[in-house]
Amino acid sequence: MSPIVNNHRKTLISLAILLVIVALAFFIYSTLRFHIVSTVPSTNNFPTEMTYFDINFNQELSNRGFAVSSSPKIIDSYSVSGKSIKIALISQPLNTKTTYTVTIVYVASTSGSHLSNKTFVFRPKVIPFSKLPKNVQQALLQPQVKYDQTVEDNPLLSKLPFNGPGESYSITYNLQNNAVVIDITAPSQQMQQYALSWIEQQGVNINSLNIQYITAQVQP
């Protein structure tokens, strides 16, 4: 083998080794660097019915200085859990004609690294449930699971809805931010009192309830 060919082969081997070292160094840097791994759902396929937005990191998160914002305001609450930011969205269908932004104002890892002013932009889509990723399907089903459990744990709810004699009042309920709200619809305060009396007759302390009064005639 000529010296020229031999030198050329050595050069190629050296370059290959260098490329492997650079790739390995980049992999180690990417793994150790504090960064976002994924979001659920993806900002490219954000369902209009989605009530959660999870942002997943490669490191454990700290609560210190943590803040998130959105425009328009669609955030109901947010928290950190392990390596994820858990954002609960306001319980209403998102508008397909609106562009939404969610911004991580500041978040830090428990090791001291931090990110700030990281913005996610998305425009919701109407996506059939069957075509959603499994993790998104599970996220959409969570509110219903909590709702079913809440109903099961509260004996009053199994008797609702209830209408008073002659449609004099109506008692229903709904779930707002995973809390039960009792709706009493009646045309007058006297009818409202009758509704409260009926609730007490079921063995329930009305002071323990979150009651919303709606002054209106009950529709048969």
Image: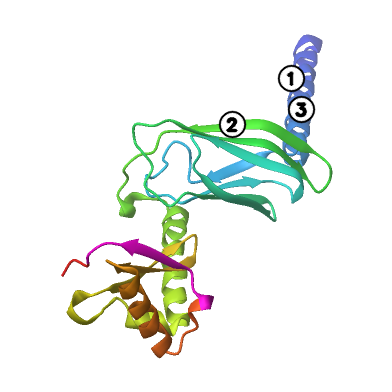
Toward the right, the furthest residue is 112
Label 2, on which residue? 119
> Which class describes the residues within 10 Å of circle 3: few (<14), some (14-19), or many (20+)?
few
Residue 207 x, y percent position in the rendering:
52, 77
Closest to the observer: 56 or 207?
A: 207
Label 1, on which residue? 12
Residue 6 x, y percent position in the rendering:
78, 16
User: Could you tell me the amino acid type at mark 2?
Assistant: Thr
The image shows a total of numbered marks equal to: 3
Residue at horizontal 59 percent and vertical 31 percent from the top: 119
State how far apart marks 1 and 2 are (Cα): 43 Å
Describe the element under mark 1 as helix, strand or loop: helix
Toward the top, the furthest residue is 4
Which of pointers 3 and 1 indicates the residue nearer the eye?
3
User: Could you tell me the amino acid type at mark 3?
Assistant: Val
State how far apart marks 3 and 1 are (Cα): 15 Å
Q: Which quadrant of the figure contains the C terminus?
A: bottom left
Q: Earlier in the sequence, mark 3 or mark 1?
A: 1
State how far apart marks 3 and 2 are (Cα): 30 Å
Query: Do the CB atoms of the residues marked 3 and 1 lie less than 8 Å apart?
Result: no
Residue 111 x, y percent position in the rendering:
83, 46
Label 3, on which residue? 22
User: Could you tell me the amino acid type at mark 1?
Assistant: Leu
Q: Is residue 80 left or right of residue 197?
A: right
Query: Is 155 inside the magenta-drawn segment?
Result: no
Q: Earlier in the sequence, mark 3 or mark 2?
A: 3
Residue span colored magenta: 207-217
Residue at horizontal 78 percent and vertical 9 percent from the top: 4
Residue 97 x, y percent position in the rendering:
34, 31
